[in-house]
Image (tube, grey):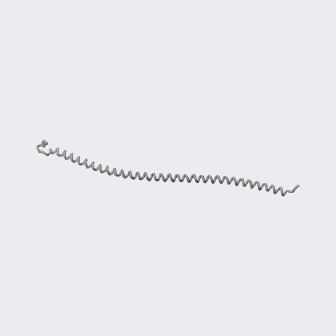
Amino acid sequence: MNRGNGVEGQLPEHRQKQYEAGVAMYQKLAAERDDFETKLHEANRKIAEMKVQVDSLNSVTSMMESSYKTAEIKMEERIARYQHERDEAVRRTATLEAILLNLHTILGNAIVLEGHDNADSQRPVD
């Protein structure tokens, strides 16, 4: 094949330099592409690892939220039970106070009546 310079298979010097520059540029771009593919693969691997970590943290968070809710429910039940016990104690105290007040009144009246009976029995009869 004749390329116009009379020497078959050879390029003119300026074309040879352009060809070499083109091959060098291709090789440089191919190396960059390979480097980017390696970096992309590494980034995808890290993303996969981080997804596993996020899933794990989400599981731990869900477990902690569940434990918290369970503890909160138990605490609310205990509070309700203690409030009921307190209310019952207040009710019993009020009942006992009323009974004691009634007993005090009854005993006071009995003492007053007995005092009158004693006073009447100690009076001379006319």
Residue 64 x, y percent position in the rendering: 47, 53
Residue 30 x, y percent position in the rendering: 25, 48
In this view, which residue lies farthest toward the right?
A: 126
Residue 10 x, y percent position in the rendering: 14, 46
The image quadrant where one finds the C terminus is: bottom right
Residue at 29% across / 49% down in the picture? 37
Q: Quadrant of residue 5?
A: top left
Residue at 72% across / 53% down in the picture? 102
**48 and 123: which is toward the camera:** 48
In this view, which residue lies farthest toward the top?
A: 4
Residue at 70% across / 54% down in the picture? 99
5 is higher (above) or lower (below) than 57: above
Residue at 53% across / 52% down in the picture? 73
The mark total stands at 0
Image position of 63 (left or right of 46): right
In this view, which residue lies farthest toward the left?
A: 6
Image position of 66 (left or right of 35): right
Residue 18 x, y percent position in the rendering: 19, 45
Q: Quadrant of residue 93?
A: bottom right
The image quadrant where one finds the N terminus is: top left
